[in-house]
Every structure is written in C-alpha cells, then in structure tokens.
Amino acid sequence: MKQIEVQIMGQSYRLGCPEGGEQRMLDAVERVDSAMCRIRDAGKVKARDRIAVLAALNLAFDVPDRAAAAAAPVATEEGGSPSVAETDPRLAALIGRLDQALGGDGHLL
C-alpha cells in the first residue's frame, strides 16, 4: 500500500491507498477539501468536526444516484428552474432535518 501526503482544509494528512489508486485518492481529497471549505467559508459552522460531518453527508447524499442528480433541474441565479430540493420532497425533508439538528449553527443550505 502506498502512502501519500495531502492537505484538507489546511491540515496535513498521510493517507494509505492501493498502488495505482493515487489519482483516485487525490480526486477524493479534492472533493472533500472543496466541500469542507465551502461550508467553512459560508461562516455559519466553525467546528472542524461539524464541518466534516456536513461535508460527508453532502458527499454521501450525492453518491447513490448521480445519474438522476445530473438530470434533475438546478436553480439559477436568475430564478430559472426549480432546485433539486424544491422538486424532491425527500431531499427537502432531509435538509429540513439537518437544519433542525444544526440549531444555532445556521442552516445547511
């Protein structure tokens, strides 16, 4: 197993990955780092562990059906198509539950 050194939200981590899997691991690190930085930069959540949990939930939610997500309408700044949360009641309910769990930390989206 090969080890690589990466940075996530400015902190270094040494990760193990199978031979030949370095690029896949680096792509995963980039997705996690981007997700965590977006949550941190929104300024509503400060604790690193809470940011990590929210990023993990967001990434895990995207995994099961990427094809359906790619075909779903996305909101535009000009108020174009409705967002996925507006068209999928399960997603809207999940976001509502996460917002409730966050309490004073602010809203997920």
Image (tube, rainbow, N blue to C red):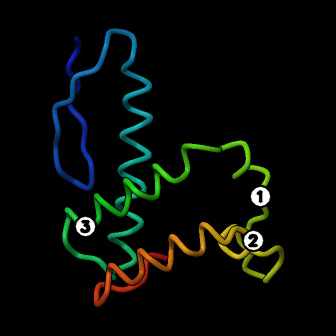
**Label 2 neighbour load within 10 Å: few <14, some 14-19, many 20+:** some
Image vertical order of residue 38 relative to residue 93, above or below: above
Q: Where is residue 58 in the image (x, y as percent from the top left)?
A: 46, 58
Query: Mark 2 highlights which residue?
Result: 87
Q: Where is residue 27 in the image (x, y as percent from the top left)?
A: 44, 34
Q: Position of residue 41 (x, y in %)?
A: 36, 73
In this view of the protein, which residue sits in the foreground, 12 or 92? 92
Image vertical order of residue 35 relative to residue 94, above or below: above
Image check: 52 left or right of 107?
left
Q: Which residue is drawn at 71% across and 76% down?
A: 86
Q: Residue at x 40, y 77 (%)?
A: 42
**Label 1 neighbour load within 10 Å: few <14, some 14-19, many 20+:** some
Q: Position of residue 72 (x, y in %)?
A: 77, 58
* Tag of residue 50: 3
**Label 3 neighbour load within 10 Å: few <14, some 14-19, many 20+:** some
Query: Mark 1 highlights which residue?
Result: 72
Callouts 3 and 1 close, C-beta under 8 Å: no
In this view of the protein, which residue sits in the foreground, 23 or 57? 57
Callout 2, which amino acid? Thr
